[in-house]
Amino acid sequence: MIHQKENSTCFTTPSMNYFCYEKPRFSDNSKEGVSIVRSNTTETFGELHAEPTDRGSSYFTMKNMTRIKGDTAMITFTDRDGYVYERHAKTAANFEFSTIVEKFDTFVSDCNNEENPRVTIIQYLGIATIDGLDYFVTWHTGGDLENPISCDYPQIIKYSFGHDFGI
């Protein structure tokens, strides 16, 4: 179990779910760290990303993150490098918008409404200091949907903030 391993970090979400992750593995080139996140209270698991605050975070539809104060950050979302268009060619995804996030804010970063409707859910865990450097820490998991949904961008992202995902 992750929470019993040396150097693991655990946290409890506002929904009282207990998650743990091992110290992220960092790549030499980008200084981005990745680890697996696993809940000890639910079946939920996902992938954690730690990205330097001086560089910002950029994956899925997140183009950049900027630290504001404490754990508060601003995320700019866009169809970075055609990510949405490549995955969902039927979606016109030319958009860009920014929003402020606080620790444990959870949102949909992207979705598909194809044969197997699915969303990618990201939770912002705030700023963590690892080996003397500050990192934006987020984790993501996939969610299967019973029915297709409208994957209109940026609305699917904007309107997901404040939704209770149960994580």
Image (cartoon, rainbow, N blue to C red):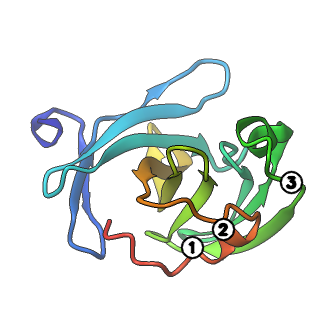
The reply to whether the C-beta atoms of the residues labelled 3 and 2 are less than 8 Å apart is no
Residue 23, located in which quarter of the rendered image?
top left
Picture coordinates of residue 154, whole percent (x, y): 76, 66
Q: Nearer the viewer, residue 127 or 112?
A: 112
Looking at this view, name the residue that lies furthest to the bottom: 162
Q: Quarter holding the N terminus?
A: top left
Disc number placed over residue 156 in the picture, else none: 2
Q: Residue at the location (72% across, 72% down)? A: 155
Disc number placed over residue 160 in the picture, else none: 1
**Element on which disc 2 rests:** helix
Residue 88, located in which quarter of the rendered image?
top right
Amino acid type indicated by mark 1: Ser
Picture coordinates of residue 146, whole percent (x, y): 41, 59
Q: CA distance from mark 1 to mark 3?
A: 19 Å
Comparing labels 1 and 3, the label whose residue is closer to the camera: 3
The reply to whether the C-beta atoms of the residues labelled 1 and 3 are less than 8 Å apart is no
Picture coordinates of residue 129, whole percent (x, y): 46, 49
Q: Quarter holding the C terminus?
A: bottom left
Q: CA distance from mark 2 to mark 1?
A: 6 Å
Q: Earlier in the sequence, mark 3 or mark 2?
A: 3
